[in-house]
Image (cartoon, helix red, strand yellow):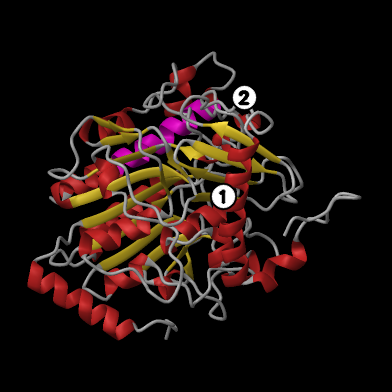
Amino acid sequence: MKLITYTALLLLFTAIGSIRGAEKETPNFVIFVADDMGWGDSGTYGHPLIKTPNLDKLASEGVKFTQCYSACGVCSPSRAAILTGRTPYRNGVWRHLSGVHEAHLRASEITYPELLKGIGYETCHVGKWHLNSKQQFNTPEFPQPGDHGFDYWMYSHNNAEPSHKNPVNFVRNGEPVGEMKGYSAQLVAAEAAHWLEDIRDPEKPFALSVWVHEPHSPIATDPQFSDLYKGHENRKYMGNITQLDHALGQVMDALDEAGVSDDTLLFFTSDNGPVPAYGGTAGGLRGVKRSSHEGGIRVPGVARWPGHIEAGSVSNVPVIGSDIFATILDIVGIPLPDDRTIDGTSMRPAFAGEAVTRTIPLYWRTHVSQADDRSALRIGDWKIVSNDEMNQFMLFDIEKDWKEEHDLAADMPEKTEEMRKALFKVWDGIVAEGPSEWWLGERTKPKKGAKLSY
């Protein structure tokens, strides 16, 4: 049984009582996550050639966020933040989890699927997982989706192998599936549709995660999609985006066929920014995957919830992947856990373009080789970006300078110092609370002569 360190029974009894007594909302939730899809990788966000008719449709029926962020510039951490509402170094999934490594999404973390199960929801995860290292995948010694609140799952550790075409590495509820004919996004969406139509209890609300592999490498694109871009040198990548968009359409159609679209909050996003080497684009933003500049962390974000979100609206309010946890709990009336820090906040006001209230500023830190853009914090329109040692800083007015072309640190030393102190306040709290024994020993060694500032 999963260990929950706060008063779980009290929390659930309170939640159940509040829902029954106050008739709280219990909509369905679908969280659709693309893999390495950049802010500029869709017609919905202004790409002149890439066709994304289903994402366009979703935006026309809901709200498009112009400032939606992933919680990290790389995949495993940002996904852990979606499930837990906690910034990656705090929840333990602080790095890309591959090969042999001790880090994983710990059993002690609390996810929104398990809390929803406590009030009668059915839950399903299909697609990429990547919340444990490869040697921990599908082994009972380490938590798997079923230990984090999912009733049913079909998942892969990381990428579809050997590529998006005919993958061989899916596991369904603990049992290897073997080779699956077709392309990954469509296979994942078909499994989601199968669960919706044939497995779930139609009398219960549900939470469904659909985490496709596209457009992460190794890319394989169905000719029906790449042929849309014949003659273009980037046709394989652009077709791959249309391929994942088609999978989104499969899920939307399945919701329609099940008769639940009108009572479902569907949220589409990406886990981090793009990889230009494969054809991805950040739409003019500075930085790419693994960066804490906007191009590494600003991603597509579209939400549809009929009757609650104005169709065809646009929200400029900054939101982040870790807000999904708090938003879901806010909607169903479950109070946030009180024995740990929750970094996210409910984005419900942002659905209507209204500001959200944050007790912890937007914060990012990406573990990778030393560079000048690994840690960042945003408060209002101001964003500070630091190097890996956190002793060099850049300052940007993001609303006016969304491309981060004008570093104001030297011109505004007082504001830079104010933001630096705020950055360290958040970081010091993370160091005190996160499983530092996992990551302090693996920090990149400082450059010769460099002095750590913490």
Task: Give the crowd class for mark 2: few <14, some 14-19, many >=20 residues within 10 Å.
Answer: some
Quadrant the C terminus occupies: bottom right
Q: Which residues are magenta?
A: 236-250
Tag 2 residue: 406
Amino acid on which the number 1 mark rests in the picture: Trp
Q: Give the mark nearer the N terminus: 2 vs 1.
A: 1
421 is higher (above) or lower (below) than 302: below
Asked which secondary structure carries label 1, the reply is: strand
Amino acid on which the number 2 mark rests in the picture: His
Quadrant the N terminus occupies: bottom left
Residue 293 occupies quadrant: top right
Asked which secondary structure carries label 2, the reply is: loop
Residue at (60, 29) in percent of width and height: 286
Horizontal relation, residue 194 to residue 390: left or right:
left
Q: Is residue 68 something one can see in this rendering?
A: yes
Horizontal and vertical percent position of residue 215: 52, 38
Which residue is farthest top?
231
Is 242 in the magenta?
A: yes
What is the chief secondary structure element of the magenta stretch? helix
